[in-house]
Structure formats: C-alpha cells, structure tokens
Image: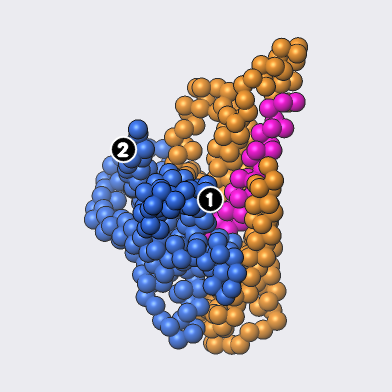
Chain colours: A blue, B orange
C-alpha cells in the first residue's frame, strides 16, 4: 500500500514513522532531560572556573584554563569518546547516558565560564566599590548592583549555549544512547526509511529549539523592559 | 565493523599512518568546505541584506540549519541524494553539507557586519560621486571584513571541530580513524589523547589569534 506523495522515484511512507512515533517522543524527552541537566550542572561548574581563571594565577587558574581551552578547542564528539572509551580504559566504565551527560557538562562549563568571564569584564570595576561605599555589604552589592548588570550581558550568550547543548546531545547516537537522534536511528533500522524518520526528527529538534528561543525572548521581554 | 574479526593486536606503525591519513582528511574537509562556505556565505549574506525578498526566502533555511543537529543534516543530505537516485560518496556528502552549513553561518556574520557599517559612510560615499558599486567595494566591504574577522575565525574553528561528525555517513576522518584503531587495538586512552592533541594544536592557536584580533579591533 502506498501512502503519501511522490517525489521523483521515491515514495514517502509516513505511516511507518507514525507507528514508531512514541519511540521518537521518548527520545525527545531524554534529549530535553540531558539538555536541562547539562546546562544547570555546567553553569554550576562554570562559576568557579570563571572566577579562578579571572584570578589568573596559581594552580586553580591553570586548572580552569586547561578545562576551558580543551572544552573549546576539541570536538564535542571527542569529549564524548573521552568520557565513554577513555575513562573506560582507566577502569571507569560509564553508561552511555552518564558519559554523554558528563561530556556535555564539561563542554558547557568551558563555554559558559568564558561567557561569565566576559560578563564580569563587562561590568565596570568601579561599581562594586561604589556599592560598598553606599554601605552595602559584599552580598548586597553583588545581588543588587553587579548581578543585574551581569545578567543583561550574559543572558543571550547563555541561551545560545543552551541551544548548543541541545544540538550536542544528538551525539549520544554515536555511543548508542537512545536520545532523539539515537532513537530515530533505532526506529528506522527495521524499515530503512531513513529520510522520512530523520526529517521528522529534524522537525522535532526545530520545535524544541524554537521553544527555547521563544521562551528566552519572552523572559527577556519581561525582565528587561523598563 | 570491518575489523571486528581481527583478533586483538597491539598498536602498529601502520596504525599511526592510518590515523594521520584521517588527520589529512579532517584538514581537507575543513579547508575545502571552509573556503566554499565562506564564498557562499558572503554572497548569501550580501544578498540577504540588500534584497528583502531574498532575505525573507532565506530566513527559514538559515533557521533550520542552525537549530537541527549537524549529524542529522549529514544523514538527511545523504539519504536525500540516495532517494533522488544519485547517491553521493561520503566525502561528497561531507563537503556539501559542511559547505552549506558554513555558508549559512557566514551569511549571518556578513549580515551583522553590513549592519554595523554606519549608513552615513555609504551616503557620504555617494555624495562624493561614487557609484553604488564603488561604495560597496571601497567602503562597505573593507569595513565588513574587518568587523566580521574574529567571529569568522570562531566559526572556522567550529567547522574544523564539526568535521568529526562526517563519520556518521561513513567517511573516515581523524576521529573515525582513531575509533577504528581503538576497536582493534584496545588502546583507547593513548590514541584518544593523541587525537585530541591534534585538534587542539590546530584550533587553539587560531582561536588565540582570533581573540587577540577581537581585542585589537
């Protein structure tokens, strides 16, 4: 039975994709989960990295520099292989889920640390002493004076990184994880309707990416209007 | 899995050559698609900024390329051409996809660069008697090139790292070559570290230079 429209000599069989759609949906949920976790944990790791690197001296600065530069100057897929095969060779066998998560946290932390550092450099250095001279303590000067300015600078680069994290989770397929791309790969393996399956997956990524950017724009509009 | 039947064997010199060949493939992919993508991106970016219709037409493709994982783009290009009855070999799929990808990214940079040129400069050029083309060639283009250079370098580094994904359609570049040798020899850590160093040695100096330029401009 042929369903769908004709293009050249190729017949699109969408019904096969819809039959497997729950599998793709599960994959999409896993993708979203890894994206969110990796961004949150990556941000947590990025804060000390940015501060140590800003300090510029000592072992901690060296450590932060090594982390940031290797995260930014090697392919994400390499970082994933390192977590999966490399740590495995050291006797630390991680599941593909943990390996992917750790590698993307590593990657996010490297990029976000630079975003934070750029943000901190963008806030004029006189602001903190000025706030302190008004009688604010260190905590108050950070939350009421520094942070609002920092937030404006880092907001869109941060959202950009969330999008990169989403795209990077697709590499889970290469180590056999069933996130959206891996699940699609699995689902199409019986029918070899590769084109239809990945077209649907592409659409799903597009929708997730759009939700992220629309959410960010709405948040920015609510926060930054004044 | 062409090596799965070979019994475990230690690393050999031939493995090093195999991996180095993969490294050459990585460089080939980066250089060719970097050049093709840049030319395409400059043309696209200029057209998008100067023609509202073209800009409207290109908005969706550019958006898609930037929000769908590259790995899926490779698979789609590969299976699209198979579906059309003209299958491409893995190198062609890699070069085509990466060039388009680079082109889309570069076109965004060119657009941002053109917008950063103050309109007054172009008007001043016209009032000096320059033609529209002369203004583009002598005023807009040099300024755009200057402003977009650091970001373009960043994109180029991204492209070099992204060549690692061509392995999904079966092309043997550096990382895939390494993985094949790892499967056979079981020396994961040593080989991976070597390969990581290869990427780092290429990307780090260029990104350092990019950051230096950014601060200078």
Between circles 2 and 1, the one closer to the viewer is: 1
Residue at the disc numbered 1: A125
Assign the magenta stretch its main secondary structure: helix
Letter of the chain that mark 1 sits on in the rendering:
A
Q: In this view, does A204 lie above or below A72?
A: above
Q: Where residue B141 sits: x, y (%)?
A: 70, 30
Q: Residue at x 35, y 34 (%)?
A: A225
Q: Where residue A201 sits: x, y (%)?
A: 36, 50
- Answer yes or no: do the residues labelled 2 and 1 have beta carbons within 8 Å? no
Residue at the disc numbered 2: A222
Identify the element where label 2 is drawn: helix
Q: Where residue A84 sits: x, y (%)?
A: 45, 74
Q: In this view, does A151 lie above or below A48?
A: above
Residues in magenta, as a range? B138-167
Q: Is residue A5 above or below residue A41?
A: above
Q: In which quarter of the image is the C terminus of chain B?
A: top right
Q: Residue at x 39, y 52 (%)?
A: A135
Task: Give the Cα separation between the discs numbered 2 and 1.
Answer: 28 Å
Identify the element where label 1 is drawn: loop
Q: Residue at x 66, y 16 (%)?
A: B123
């Amino acid at each position: 039975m042929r369903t769908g429209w004709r293009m050249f000599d190729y017949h699109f069989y969408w019904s096969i994709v819809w039959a497997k759609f729950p599998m793709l949906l599960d994959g999409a949920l896993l993708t979203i989960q890894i994206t969110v976790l990796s961004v949150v944990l990556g941000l947590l790791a990025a804060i000390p990295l940015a501060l140590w690197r800003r300090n510029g001296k000592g072992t901690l600065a060296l450590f932060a520099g090594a982390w940031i530069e290797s995260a930014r100057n090697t392919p994400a897929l390499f970082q994933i292989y390192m977590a999966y095969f490399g740590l495995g060779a050291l006797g630390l066998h991680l599941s593909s889920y943990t390996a992917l998560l750790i590698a993307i946290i590593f990657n996010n932390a490297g990029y976000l640390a630079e975003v934070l550092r750029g943000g901190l450099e963008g806030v004029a250095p006189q602001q903190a002493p000025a706030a302190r001279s008004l009688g604010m303590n260190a905590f108050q000067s950070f939350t009421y004076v520094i942070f609002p300015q920092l937030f404006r600078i880092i907001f869109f680069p941060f959202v950009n990184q969330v999008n990169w994290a989403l795209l990077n989770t697709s590499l889970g397929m290469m180590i056999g994880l069933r996130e959206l791309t891996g699940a699609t790969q699995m689902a199409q393996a019986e029918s070899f309707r590769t084109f239809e399956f990945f077209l649907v997956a592409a659409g799903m990524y597009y929708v997730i990416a759009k939700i992220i950017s629309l959410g960010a724009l709405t948040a920015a509009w609510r926060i930054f209007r004044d | 899995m062409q090596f799965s039947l070979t019994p475990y064997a230690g690393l050999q010199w031939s493995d090093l050559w195999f991996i180095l060949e993969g490294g050459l493939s990585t460089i080939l992919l980066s250089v060719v698609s970097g050049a093709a993508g840049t030319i395409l991106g400059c043309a696209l970016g200029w057209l998008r900024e100067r023609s509202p219709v073209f800009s409207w037409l290109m908005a969706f493709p550019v958006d898609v390329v930037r929000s769908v994982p590259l790995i899926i783009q490779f698979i789609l290009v590969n299976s699209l051409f198979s579906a059309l009855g003209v299958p491409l070999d893995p190198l062609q799929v890699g070069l085509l996809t990466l060039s388009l990808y680079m082109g889309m990214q570069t076109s965004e940079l060119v657009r941002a660069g053109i917008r950063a040129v103050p309109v007054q400069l172009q008007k001043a050029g016209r009032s000096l008697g320059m033609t529209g083309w002369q203004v583009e060639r002598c005023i807009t283009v040099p300024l755009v090139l200057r402003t977009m250079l650091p970001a373009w370098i960043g994109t180029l580094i991204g492209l070099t790292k992204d060549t690692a994904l061509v392995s999904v359609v079966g092309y043997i570049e550096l990382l895939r070559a390494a993985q094949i040798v790892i499967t056979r020899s079981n020396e994961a850590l040593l080989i991976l570290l070597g390969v990581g160093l290869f990427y780092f040695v290429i990307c780090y100096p260029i990104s350092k230079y990019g950051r230096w330029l950014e601060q200078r401009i």
